[in-house]
Image (tube, grey):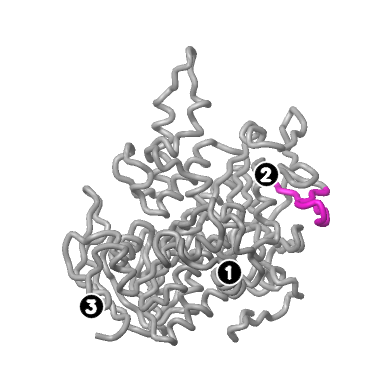
């Protein structure tokens, strides 16, 4: 058997009445980048956990390096390293401690700190492109740096098989290019790399073969030449959802809009330049930028989560004039809903049920005389959002952690819609969500905008904005650097704005050209 070979035959795995895998088969070889593709709930993450020894199949054959891993410890001994969808770090521990956890016992107690600190600084510099303090508590670092720590931990294990489950979801475009360089290096050294991802552009650039799952079954394996968005969509989704996806590609019309929300002379940091922002009624504004350029802070300022250094967003409060947004309470009272892409930290309540996670924001609005909660409208709203967003659930009383990552994210989006807001602010909401579901989300957001609602949508994936956003605001140096509209909402102009170039051709370090 080749170094790094994986063989899976007729794999089945159920959780109660839910069939996660229902006849999955595929193979991957050493020196290959192999993608596992499918909609949310198609069984991709379950497959990754079986290959990693976290879960055991109900039936079928699994061979990874000639063995069926029975535990994560056994998988690690075999040379299997897995980067799971959830970013697993200890926020209280340092970067170095997180990077080397498990290298020499539980927390590498016997390792000399000097060499570990130097090695940590070197690998984090290579991965992130910036200097990272090895002693910094991880909880103070951005989500993207936490993702790099997890990736670095896997690379340090010198794996024979590397499994990446949505490992680029927290990374921006520039960081994803660096990740691709690491993947190519490992592939060329003979490592078998398995990628679970929803980023179609990523698949086209990096993957040698792709296996497509639908409802837990393998429907096809495509060679590199056939890995296109059209082919993947046709195989991943039923015909009814393909029609919805095509309808969602129709670009919105532009028109004069009444102002709903604005900010004047907003400063995200004390030393950043001030800028103005305006959101119109029925408008969808995309927000993007390379990692750490201020767009995340801007989104959180709009939603009242974290105030800017100076200036406050202001919303038109109808007959009551204007009102400033200085806190979450202000945002909630004024009809602004927020959806986080970091569902583990900012979104879900893991000990609560699916129903409770979606309905949380509705209890106060449905208080009756005497403090009783009116259950009927809440249950109705829950059922409506499950249907609207095609959330694949078991019993509503099941814990939200029983759902796939993508369906957990749908619950958070449903929570925002159920609150009947005037403005929805979304912070990378489609992280870990498949292409078909993304397009359904775009369609629902367009319906929301057509009804007079307004949308601010942050994403690092350029393709999300094309045919969807009315305007794209690009951030650099903690300020709004450039606004693009109409024909400018395309890959080349957005890339150029993100890198601070004139709207001309952009060439990646890998030699790939966009434009």
In the rendered structure, the answer to whether residue 32 lies left or right of residue 122 reads left
Mark 1 neighbour class, 10 Å CA radius: few under 14, some 14 to 19, many 20 or more? few
Q: Earlier in the sequence, mark 3 or mark 2?
A: 3
- Most foreground residue, 336 or 168: 168
From the image, tell me which residue sits under label 3. Answer: 66
Q: Secondary structure at mark 3?
A: loop
Residue 315: which numbered mark, if any?
none
Residue positioned 50% across, 79% down in the render: 205
Query: Where residue 213 appears, x then y in whole percent?
Result: 31, 67
Image height of 60 relative to 369, above or below: below
Q: Which residue is mark 2?
A: 306
- Closer mark to the observer between disc 3 and disc 1: 1
State left or right for residue 336 relative to residue 316.
left
270 in relation to 29, above or below = above
Q: CA distance from mark 3 to mark 1?
A: 38 Å
Give the mark nearest the N terminus, 3 or 1: 3
């Amino acid at each position: 058997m080749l170094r790094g070979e994986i063989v899976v035959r007729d794999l089945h795995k159920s959780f109660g009445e839910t069939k996660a895998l229902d006849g999955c088969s595929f193979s991957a070889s050493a020196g290959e980048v192999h993608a596992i593709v499918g909609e949310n709930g198609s069984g991709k993450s379950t497959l990754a956990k079986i290959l990693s020894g976290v879960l055991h199949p109900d039936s079928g054959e699994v061979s990874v390096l000639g063995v069926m891993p029975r535990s994560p410890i056994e998988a690690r001994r075999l040379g299997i390293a897995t980067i799971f969808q959830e970013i697993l770090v200890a926020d209280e521990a340092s970067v170095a401690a997180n990077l080397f956890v498990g290298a020499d016992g539980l927390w590498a107690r016997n390792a000399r700190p000097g060499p570990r600190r130097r090695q940590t600084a070197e690998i984090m510099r290579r991965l992130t492109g910036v200097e990272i303090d090895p002693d910094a508590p991880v909880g103070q670092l951005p989500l993207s740096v936490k993702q790099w720590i997890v990736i670095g931990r896997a690379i340090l294990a010198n794996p024979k098989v590397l499994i990446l489950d949505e490992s680029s979801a927290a990374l921006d475009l520039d960081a994803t290019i660096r990740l691709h360089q690491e993947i190519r290096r490992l592939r060329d050294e003979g490592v078998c790399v398995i990628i679970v991802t929803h980023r179609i552009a990523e698949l086209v650039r990096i993957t040698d073969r792709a296996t497509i799952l639908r409802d837990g079954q393998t429907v096809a394996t495509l060679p590199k030449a056939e890995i296109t968005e059209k082919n993947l969509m046709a195989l991943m989704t039923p015909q009814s959802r393909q029609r919805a996806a095509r309808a969602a590609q129709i670009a919105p019309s532009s028109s004069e809009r009444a102002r709903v929300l604005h900010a004047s002379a907003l400063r995200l940091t004390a030393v950043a330049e001030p800028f103005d922002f305006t959101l119109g009624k029925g408008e969808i504004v995309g927000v993007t930028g390379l990692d750490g350029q201020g767009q995340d802070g801007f989104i959180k300022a709009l939603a009242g989560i974290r105030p800017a250094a100076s200036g406050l967003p202001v919303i038109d409060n109808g007959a009551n004039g204007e009102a400033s947004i200085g806190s979450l309470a202000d945002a909630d009272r004024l009809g602004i809903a927020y959806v986080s892409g970091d569902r583990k930290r900012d979104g879900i309540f893991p000990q609560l049920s699916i129903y409770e996670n979606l309905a949380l924001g509705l209890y106060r609005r449905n208080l009756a005389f005497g403090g009783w909660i009116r259950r009927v409208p809440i249950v109705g709203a829950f059922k409506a959002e499950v249907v609207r967003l095609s959330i694949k659930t078991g019993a509503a009383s099941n814990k939200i952690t029983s759902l796939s990552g993508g369906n957990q994210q749908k619950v958070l989006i449903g929570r925002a819609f159920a609150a009947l807001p005037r403005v929805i602010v979304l912070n990378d909401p489609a992280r870990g969500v498949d292409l078909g579901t993304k397009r359904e989300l775009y369609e629902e957001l367009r319906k929301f905008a057509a009804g007079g609602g307004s949308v601010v949508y942050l994403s690092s994936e350029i393709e999300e904005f094309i045919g969807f956003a009315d305007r794209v605001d690009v951030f650099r140096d903690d300020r709004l650097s450039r606004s693009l509209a109409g024909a400018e909402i395309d890959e080349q102009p957005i890339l150029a704005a993100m890198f601070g170039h004139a709207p001309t051709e952009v060439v990646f370090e890998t030699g790939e050209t966009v434009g």
